[in-house]
Amino acid sequence: MLSDTVRIQAQVLGNAYRNIFQAIGCSELDADRMADALLSADLRGLETHGAWRVPQYVQLVREGLAKVRPTINCRITGPTTAVIDGDDGFGQVVAQVAMETAMEMAQAYGTSAVAANRVNHVGTLYYFARQAVKQGFIAFLTTNSPPNMAPWGGTRPVLGTNPFSLAVPGSNGDPIILDMASSVAAKAKILVAQKAGRPIPEGWALDADGLPTTDSAKAAAGTVMPVGGAKGCRLALMVDLLAGVLSGAGFGLDAYYAKAPKRGGLGLFFSLYAVDRFMHPKEFAQRVESLTKMITEVPLAPGFESIALPGEHSRITEAAAWKDGVGLSKQTALELQQVAASLGIELTW
């Protein structure tokens, strides 16, 4: 059977992104930011937050819904707090400014909290969380998203899949990073399945009448399922309160970025804590190692070969992709080539 996957060397894919974003008017710095963030998702097997998004982002610019040269305003509100107006810039660009601001404050004062509004789709929070832990910070990051999830017991989408990331420096240089949506699956995975005419797994979504479905088209018109039932909905609500309400961005039914008129766009909330303000980093690393050993050395249940820590599978996938190339679906690879061609760029895989 012929493979439905195209293997592309990471450097080639990253350069393609840089060329595309410069071609639509981004500065070299912002094109680099976009390329690095998108490639990070692809390397970890999250095509839905990497290559698959590029044609959408280009279309946002063409429709006047995203700015390639935003005037990002960072308002310092205290020694450890700031609010950023992203001016409808790409989410990854605004998030990078927010992360750098948060790290600078946390370096000086031990902690920081930065909120941002008028932001577009941010991609994966893992990319930003990893930056923080490499500098010795514990990170708590959130962003809200368009309404795709009904409150528990309802049928009308009000909440987004609203992801969050919790990250802690690891004991051997490998960070422990929990990066997850409040839903069982990202809405993008359902849309990809719909486009390919494939069913989705049970438990991912409800149809427009609030009934469980494996039909990707019905799921796309319905609502995603929260992770952990009612608890997932409540997690999504808390994320929206921070990333949407507190930041000044859109929230609930107004948390969107791909249509006009926008009511604050999406938002984010990044908070960092310097480990060395609590204890010596070496002592912390030793304590982290002790806890992780307690977890990973538990006798295995039938059918399991190991116990993985948060972020471990991502590191393994990323290392393999750097070596063997990034695996993209043929359809996504083709759409990348098509959007590049529309900008006068030839991509060959």
Image (cartoon, grey):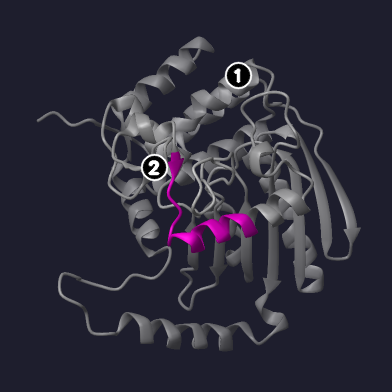
Q: Is residue 271 above or below residue 14?
A: below
Count every numbered label the image shows and give the total: 2
Q: Is residue 19 visible?
A: no
Q: Is residue 72 above or below residue 173?
A: above
On screen, residue 180 versus residue 243, left or right, reads: left
Residue 70 in picture, x, y percent from top left: 77, 31
Magenta extent: 223-238
- Image quadrant containing the C terminus: top left
- Residue at 76 percent across and 56 percent down: it is 114
Q: Amino acid at mark 2?
A: Leu
Q: Residues within 10 Å of mark 1 (few under 14, many from 20)?
A: some
Q: Amino acid at mark 1?
A: Ala
Residue 324 in picture, x, y percent from top left: 28, 44
- Image quadrant containing the N terminus: top left
User: Which residue lies under the disc numbered 1?
Assistant: 23
Residue 282: in magenta span: no
Distance Cα–Cα, label 2 vs label 1: 40 Å
Residue 234: in magenta span: yes
Residue 291 in picture, x, y percent from top left: 44, 85
User: Which residue lies under the disc numbered 2?
Assistant: 206
- Residue at 39 percent across and 59 percent down: it is 315
Q: Nearer the viewer, residue 44 or 160?
A: 160
Secondary structure beneath label 1:
helix
Q: Is residue 159 above or below residue 31?
A: below
On screen, residue 104 versus residue 311, left or right, reads: right
Q: Which mark is residue 80?
A: none
Query: For residue 78, which quarter of the picture?
Result: bottom right
Q: Of the residues under marks 2 and 1, which one precedes in the sequence?
A: 1
Secondary structure beneath label 2:
strand
